[in-house]
Image (cartoon, rainbow, N blue to C red):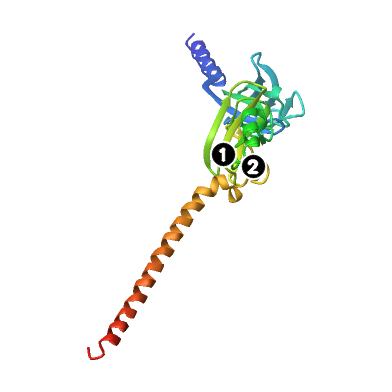
Amino acid sequence: MFHSFVSCCFCFCHLTGVFGDTDTVKSVSVLEGDSVTLHSDAELQTDDVIQWRFGSENTLIATINVGTGSFSTINDRLTLDKTTGSLTITNTTITDSGLYQIRARIIYRFSVTVYARLPVPVISNNSSQNPSSSSSSSSSSSPQQNCSLVCSVVNVGHVTLSWYKGNSLLSSISVSDLSISLSLPLEVECLDDFYSCVVAYSFSNQTTHLNNTQLCQPCSESVHCCGVTEAVIRMVISALVGVATVAVLVYDIRPRKEEQQRRSNPHTN
């Protein structure tokens, strides 16, 4: 009786080890079409039978029998590491998103999200969407008004769309919905080569750099943008020239006065 009880306890402990569970779910992100490997952290024993299951229905997708050296997967896009039991998914699709479990001596879980590839942001002139500013600028002979731009992406979700000047963030907008279009406007006085629009996931991005000759007047040629700066520089230069002129006149007039005094008073030492 005692020996039977000990045997039962031993079997129970062995099963507990086989079906041990972890509460941790590892999050994994991948772009559609790329490959991803789910590392098991399992130390395979000679008598282990490894199972990979997928989805809420725990569908069996791959197995390894370490003792016999046999393994199988449900399709050619799945490959198994016979040493560690890790699973690699190649040429991923959106339908590969979901919960994966490896059942060995401990159950490990992975939450895989496959994201659609990001489109390249499109930058365009936004003046056509603002008739009032367009009409006023055409009827006036004043210098060019602020340049109105808009950056757009289509069919995106869970992304952030941002305007940058160099490494400085100017503005951004985020969305968690799926398959929508995003637009982000930007108003500037003049353009240089440092403006860019970026659409990004947390792990990947696409960037469009703004060529300063495309849509708006470059800063180097913009009177509206650079006129104030040029005026200040001209004022400073004029002031320096004025000071130098006064100094030259002072040093030039003083010797002349002394020479005139000597001529009028020849006997003066």
Q: What separation in Å lies between label 1 and label 2 (alpha carbons)?
A: 9 Å
**Residue shown at 53%/49% (left/top)?**
227
Say whether residue 171 is left or right of residue 92: left
Q: Which residue appears at 45% of the width and 60% of the height?
A: 238
Q: Contact (CB < 8 A) between labels 1 and 2?
A: yes
Q: Amino acid at mark 1?
A: Val
Q: Nearer the viewer, residue 187 or 19?
A: 187
What residue appears at the point 74 percent right and 29 percent down from the top-left corner? 77
Residue 235 in percent (x, y) is at 45, 56
- Reading the chain from its start, which is encountered first: label 1 or label 2? 1
Q: Residue at x 64, y 32 (%)?
A: 134
Q: Quadrant of residue 56?
A: top right
**Crowding near pointer 2: few (<14 within 10 Å), some, many (20+)?**
many
Give residue 243's position: percent from left, percent from top: 38, 64
Residue holding disc 1:
188
The residue beneath circle 2 is 216
